[in-house]
Amino acid sequence: NKVFTSVGGVIWTTRTLPSTHIWRQVVANGTKLAVFDLNGNVVVSLDDGATWTSGTLSMTCLQMAITSGNGLWLALQGAGATTGYATSPDGLTWTNGTLPSSAPWGYSGYGDRFVVMDTTTNCATSLTGL
């Protein structure tokens, strides 16, 4: 239930998360940070990691791909799931959606738009993440 934060990558500060899980991913969205496990648990910091608040992702899966951009977090269901995704402006409140293919989606990124790929040949893009 620990996370380490640093402003410049030289000096690190230990922070205690509000719950104990096997945390898998951390994703930044500006000064907001979110840490995810594989069971739908998420903790969010709005102040560069100084304090943390617990939330719940609206889906669970064995593996997920998470990215951020345009003021949103985007989480894809990965292995063992098919078409689900969820978006959140704050990391605490999530809205589910469905992607246009039934293949498992597991790769995501953000440039000037969200780009997601499945494990076959499908790719989808969105300017808004919805």
Image: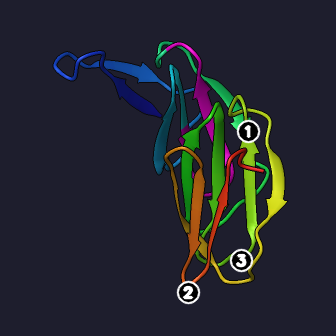
Q: Amino acid at mark 2?
A: Thr
Label 3, label 2: how far apart the Cα atoms are: 12 Å
Is tag 3's residue or tag 2's residue first in the polypeptide sequence? 3
Q: Which residue is denoted by mark 3 in the rendering?
A: 82
Any magenta on residue 43? yes
Q: Which residues are magenta?
A: 35-47
Is tag 1's residue or tag 2's residue first in the polypeptide sequence? 1
Category of crowding for the residue at label 2, using alpha-carbon neighbours closer than 10 angstroms: few (below 14), some (14–19), many (at least 20): few
Nearer the observer, disc 3 or disc 2? 2
Left or right of 94: which side holds 21?
left
Nearer the observer, disc 1 or disc 2? 2
Label 1, label 3: how far apart the Cα atoms are: 20 Å
The image position of residue 38, as x and y in percent, is: 59, 57
In the drawing, what numbered circle is on residue 88? 1
114 above or below 43?
Answer: below
Res 36 visible? no
Q: Amino acid at mark 1?
A: Ser
Left or right of 8: which side holds 31?
right
Left or right of 68: which side holds 77?
right
Res 85 visible? yes
Q: Which residue is denoted by mark 2 in the rendering?
A: 120
Q: Residue at horizontal 61%, vertical 80%?
A: 122
Depth check: give the residue in front, 128 or 108: 128
The image position of residue 71, as x and y in percent, is: 64, 30
39 above or below 69?
Answer: below
Image marks 3 and 2: residues in contact by CB distance under 8 Å: no
In the drawing, what numbered circle is on residue 66? none
Q: Residue at horizontal 54%, vertical 14%?
A: 51
